[in-house]
Image: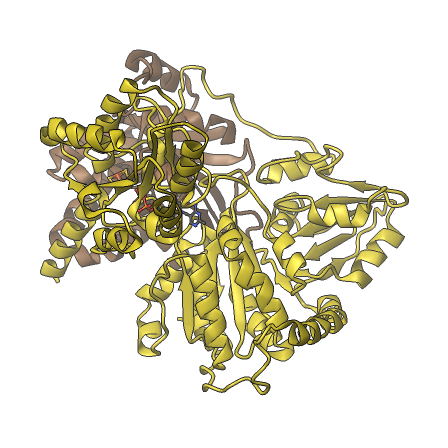
Amino acid sequence: MNKLLLLGDEAIAQGAIDAGLSGIYAYPGTPSTEITEYVQRSKEARAKNIRSSWSVNEKTAMEAALGMSYAGKRAMVCMKHVGLNVAADPFINSSITGTNGGLIVVSADDPSMHSSQNEQDSRFFGKFAMIPILEPANQQEAYDMVHYGFDISEKYKVPVLLRITTRLAHSRAGVNRKNFREQNNGSLPKDLRQFVLLPAIARKRYKILLDNQQNFDRESNESCFNQYFDGEDKSLGILASGIAYNYLMENYPDGKMLHPVLKICQYPLPKNHVERLAKECEEILVIEEGYPLIEEMLKGFLGYGLKVKGRFDGTVPRAGELNPNIVAVSMGLKDTTGNPVPSIVTTRPPSLCAGCPHIDSVLALNDVIPQYSNGRVFSDIGCYTLSALPPYETINSCVDMGASITMAKGAADAGLIPAIAVIGDSTFTHSGITGLLDAVNDKSPITIFILDNATTAMTGGQKSAATGKIEDICRGVGVAPEHIHVINPLKKHHEENKKIIQEEVAYMGVSVIIPRRECIETQKKKVREKSKSKAV
Amino acid sequence: MKKDIILAGVGGQGIITIAAAIGFAAIEAGLHLKQSEVHGMSQRGGEVSSHLRISDKEIASDLIPFGKADMIISVEPMEALRYLPNLSPEGWVITNTKPFINIPNYPDYEALMSEIKKLHHHVALDADEMAHELKSPRSANIVILGAATPFLDIDILKLENAIRTIFRSKGDNVIETNLKALHAGKEFADREVVA
Ligand SMILES: Cc1ncc(C[n+]2csc(CCOP(=O)(O)OP(=O)(O)O)c2C)c(N)n1
Ligand code: SF4
């Protein structure tokens, strides 16, 4: 059977396997994680020897994928939207070096911030890098666009950005497989200086990228993913991009469109289609998932000329994810709703699991902090971030991966002494080590908790690059061995743990405390897998 | 044929298994399907929901419009009420009555039940208790699925097949108890709907 029921993420993964992928590189991050996990689970991928284990962070992933492309093979790199910030340097520069084997960068945005610090729109990064962007409307397009994206990448020797959002990433639908292709044989770039971005070469490479812009424009105009549908009522023309197109079509139940509709799933914006829409319609409504990127482009700085409605003028809410109702209202249709939520219903925020090792760690810390004053615990991103909420209310920051150590250092520099950092094991190897070196070099009076639950728990329990290496790394970076402590975060050890914490927080230099106990969830998963393998 | 279903519960309660069973049966019946899931942060004991749409025609949106869902299937009573804005006026609520209390300010149970009894069309059952009686406490979600079968328009044989497939790796015993759980839920709902 060639029809599979796949998440958007899985459709991308299957598309890549079928399109001749040789390696996928990624660091976990909702809603992108399931792409790489699918390849890791796939028997087919294993048989084809497709490389798929986790990278330490998005930057190393991006660079390794570029290296695979240099060597002539097809590579994919996947991340959540904020991961692209981490990978921004190699990402932007890869558009200048160009590629050899096909290279697709998948960035999964999270409008409404279901599991993220912000709702930044990766299309801006694609535009910034001046490369083609693909934005599938549905799971089938997600599958098809991988093959197509590799074609475009290899035709123009540029990376291609594939941008998805949470709803598509985590929604299932039937997908037809097609277009099977073998992997590339290895080959070097024709010009061995292509990837040497010395100014003289970089200028030439940049010129090539600029010259290619007209090709990308043409591809967009001719792309089967950008479609113009005529409609009778030209008082309004509707431009819908990516998944927004589905919400629009939900409001045209018989498939007949009253107004002209331009569906956009490939960028740069297809000039011919947009021009036609602007010429033939009195007003344009832009519905796009994410920031008002297209809307801003159509309006221009002063907004003269075209009448454009969208997120800026409030026709569509300025922030947050779209849905069929928001789109209906923006089109002037009647809203629908059921009964209101009874007032007795309360919110149920996420919380640390019962028995989680992080609970014992933050409770011990909560017993020490009041000896100083509150407001000095810098933290990071992971399950332990939930300790910001009641009943713990331990931590005072969560900004970007690795920022706990460096912010604690900066605050200590400003006189907030002692300052404390709380970081997870996976976050530590992702972006904490360099900051630790800064602190060591400055002999900063900070105490760093590296919570070692032996996994990347928040994103579903992926293997952590830190496992078995944390003390060695800290010693290697220069933390004094007598100020590195491993403790067991359990209630019965509370008093002895507290004592160690008190001593190290009082120490006027860098100390590292490593509470080590496995995540309850991964522990359970291991037990389940064991009993399963016994049953078989 | 078109059914728009909201599945509701708390992270870790197994609503994805219900979705998978209905989805499998729908595909076997040759229907179109879209199913949005919740992954990520709220799986840590937070509120989770899934939009499951099945139809004999192409489905446009991954999300069900507000006021248009044909039913809410919930493995937890407070979570059933959270999604009432999604439900159509004719829609059904099929819910577990066993609360999952992991917050300090969980509402008064009697008040909660009286809200559920106010609903025009509802089937409310203690699925945990029923699963317990079947000596399969982890099958409460399948009992709830069973209670939803009278409203699904999908052949019960296809749902049985789906359960066999989903639990295949767990062995025959697990399959049998889950089939029993399915029928226990179905019989409860059949009695309710007639009455
Ligand atoms: C740049 C970036 N990449 C990925 C993520 C997604 N993410 C959030 S928390 C997390 C896992 C953290 O693991 P760890 O530090 O070990 O803490 P745990 O959840 O195990 O407690 C990841 C990958 C992110 N927020 N930002
Ligand atoms: S998943 Fe693991 S680390 Fe996260 S809260 Fe649960 S026990 Fe703690």
Residue B10 is situated, as x and y percent measured from the top left of the image, at: 33, 33
Decide which of A508, A28 is in the foreground and name it. Answer: A508
Residue A445 picture quarter: top left
Splitting the image into four quadrants, where does ligand 2 fall? top left
Which residue is drawn at the image coordinates 26% and 57% (left, top)? B165
Quarter of the image that includes the N terminus of chain A: bottom left
- From the viewer's perspective, is residue A40 above or below residue A264? below
Residue B160 is situated, as x and y percent measured from the top left of the image, at: 26, 51
Decide which of A251, A314 is in the foreground and name it. Answer: A314
On the picture, is A402 further left or further right than B158?
right
Which residue is drawn at the image coordinates 50% and 74% (left, top)? A178
Image chain in yellow: A
- From the viewer's perspective, is residue A313 above or below residue B179? above
Residue B90 is situated, as x and y percent measured from the top left of the image, at: 50, 29
Q: Is residue A4 visible?
A: no
Q: Is residue A14 visible?
A: yes
Quarter of the image that includes the C terminus of chain A: bottom left
Decide which of B146, A206 is in the foreground and name it. Answer: A206
- From the viewer's perspective, is residue A465 above or below residue B190? below
> Which hue is chain B drawn in?
brown
Which residue is drawn at the image coordinates 50% and 78% (left, top)? A70
